[in-house]
């Protein structure tokens, strides 16, 4: 595909200085160039994971009660933290509205739909007002639910409320949000304004921390002539350095493990129900936490219990039985980009998937002696994402780190569990917020 190995002429002294200032050592840069020029083989799917063959039922009865209590105990003892990737902007959330408004057609069907849904939405004003106020806002800070007493909560606030419910009252709920550095002040402002009232309402203390994706996890790229991509088409210009994808957040998880957290519960920012409907998710998180604790006791590596849900035509990575480079077959979350879609057999296996990953999991990151695992040791670097992008009108070939749920956790011990449908209510477009699962009462049903 790409030719040659990285030579000394690829990276000049000025490049080395630039990369070192960015936190990227020269050997890492050469490793990236080698992968770009000689991509690793695609994943080898054996079969989809299904109930009874890789996907377990969520425990019920006394066994579930015992696991739920163990999970609640971990939360109340301060041994569990919730991790929420929250750097994404809400551009996709409002994409339909923005496109409709750009056409200048006041009677556009999408705008009519918005007007018809307004009584069920947590926003004030019309479509133009919403776009002006929230178009570039992080999804975490977007109003998600309006309550009968007039209170409006953002996605971030609902995560706080649900985390407090996992505790079952009292104690301290630990949460960590990864955010874009440019949006950090807005997160801090909201937390300063809302935490005291939420602590009184929930009867607990919140320990909230924020982090950014480390620049040291960024990547370099190649141009069309198989050379390191530079900011200008000039061999003396600086290198282009790009974010390394969400697999870079493995470093953020390592920091939480190093702080002594035994369990890390991970949920997407947009999968959140109003408080009256959070009961099933709270109980499920407790059960998964108890299961993760049990799994960790029989493991010599990091462990995770991952909830999965039926595909229903939804895009996203899913659970499969996969053969790794050593020939061992195990359970993995696999993304479409990891598959050779020109291989009819592999494409058919992918198409036969009946579950996907909604990012509803609990990870166990300490060894039996209480020491944090070195998570980097369990990454499948062959699962790096190679992507075609452009910069300044010039095409480039770039590398993203193995995805956080798939390649970055490839060496973990994994168990998949079938989730109840009511715990997965993602908000992908503004109209999802008008659905019955996001209404708190107080409007005409």
Image (cartoon, helix red, strand yellow):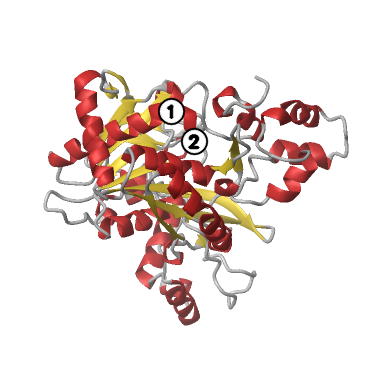
Q: Which residue is mark 1?
A: 423
Q: Viewed as shown, does residue 76 lie left or right of 95? A: left
Q: Is any part of residue 281 visible from this angle? A: yes
Residue 4 locus on image (x, y percent): 43, 61
* First in residue order: circle 2 vs circle 1: 2
Task: Name the secondary structure under disc 1.
Answer: helix
Picture disc at residue 271:
2
Q: Is residue 53 left or right of residue 36?
A: left
| Within-10-Å neighbours for mark 2: few <14, some 14–19, many 20+ | some
Q: Is residue 118 left or right of residue 66?
A: right
Q: Nearer the viewer, residue 80 or 161?
A: 161
- The x and y percentages for residue 67 are 22, 31
User: Observer-nearest residue: 45 or 418?
Assistant: 418
Q: Give the label on residue 274, or none.
A: none
- Residue 268 seen: no
- The answer to which image quadrant residue 239 occupies is bottom right
Q: Residue at x 23, y 26 (%)?
A: 65
Q: Is residue 66 above or below residue 122?
A: above
Contact (CB < 8 A) between labels 2 and 1? yes
> Is 408 rendered above or below residue 255?
above
Query: What residue do we see at 30% from left, 29% from top?
Result: 416
Of the pair 209 and 1, the residue shown nearer to us: 209
- Answer with left or right where residue 72 lies relative to residue 194: left
* Element type at mark 2: loop
Q: x, y percentage for residue 342?
A: 48, 31
Residue 5 position within the rendered picture, expressed as x and y whole percent measured from the top left: 40, 62
Disc 2 and disc 1: Cα gap in Å? 8 Å
């Amino acid at each position: 595909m790409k030719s040659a190995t990285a030579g000394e002429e690829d990276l000049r002294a000025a490049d080395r200085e630039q990369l070192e200032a960015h936190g990227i050592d020269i050997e890492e840069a050469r490793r990236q160039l080698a992968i770009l020029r000689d991509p690793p083989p695609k994943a080898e799917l054996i079969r989809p994971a299904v109930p009874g063959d890789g996907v377990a039922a969520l425990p019920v009865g006394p066994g579930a009660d015992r696991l739920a209590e163990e999970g609640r105990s971990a939360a109340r003892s301060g041994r569990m933290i919730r991790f929420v990737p929250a750097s994404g902007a809400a551009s996709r959330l409002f994409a339909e509205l923005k496109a409709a408004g750009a056409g200048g057609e006041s009677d556009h069907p999408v705008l009519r739909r918005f007007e018809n849904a307004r009584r069920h939405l947590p926003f004030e004003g019309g479509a133009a007002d919403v776009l002006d106020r929230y178009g570039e806002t992080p999804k975490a800070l977007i109003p998600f639910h309006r309550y009968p007493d007039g209170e409006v909560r953002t996605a971030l606030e609902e995560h706080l409320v649900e985390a407090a419910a996992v505790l079952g009252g009292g104690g301290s709920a630990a949460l960590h949000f990864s955010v874009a550095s440019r949006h950090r002040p807005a997160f801090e402002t909201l937390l300063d304004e809302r935490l005291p009232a939420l602590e009184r309402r929930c009867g607990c203390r919140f320990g909230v921390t924020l982090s950014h994706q480390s620049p040291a996890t960024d990547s370099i790229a190649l141009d069309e002539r198989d050379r390191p991509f530079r900011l200008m088409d000039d061999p003396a210009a600086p290198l282009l350095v790009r974010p390394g994808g969400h697999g870079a957040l493995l470093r953020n998880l390592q920091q939480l493990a190093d702080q002594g957290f035994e369990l890390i519960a991970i949920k997407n920012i947009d999968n959140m129900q109003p408080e009256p409907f959070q009961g099933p998710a709270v109980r499920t998180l407790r059960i998964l936490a108890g299961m993760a604790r049990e799994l960790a006791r029989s493991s010599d590596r990091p462990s995770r219990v991952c909830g999965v849900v039926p595909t229903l035509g939804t895009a996203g990575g899913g659970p499969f039985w996969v053969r790794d480079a050593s020939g061992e077959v195990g359970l993995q979350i696999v993304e479409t980009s990891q598959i050779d879609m020109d291989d009819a057999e592999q494409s058919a296996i992918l198409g036969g998937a009946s579950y996907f990953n909604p990012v509803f999991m609990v990870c166990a990151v300490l060894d039996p002696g209480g020491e944090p695992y070195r998570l980097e040791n369990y990454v499948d670097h062959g699962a790096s994402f190679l992507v075609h992008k452009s910069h300044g009108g010039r095409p480039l070939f770039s590398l993203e780190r193995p995805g956080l749920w798939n390649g970055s956790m490839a060496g973990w011990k994994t168990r998949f569990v079938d989730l109840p449908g009511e715990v997965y209510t993602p908000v992908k477009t503004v109209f999802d917020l008008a659905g019955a699962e996001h209404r708190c009462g107080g409007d005409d049903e």
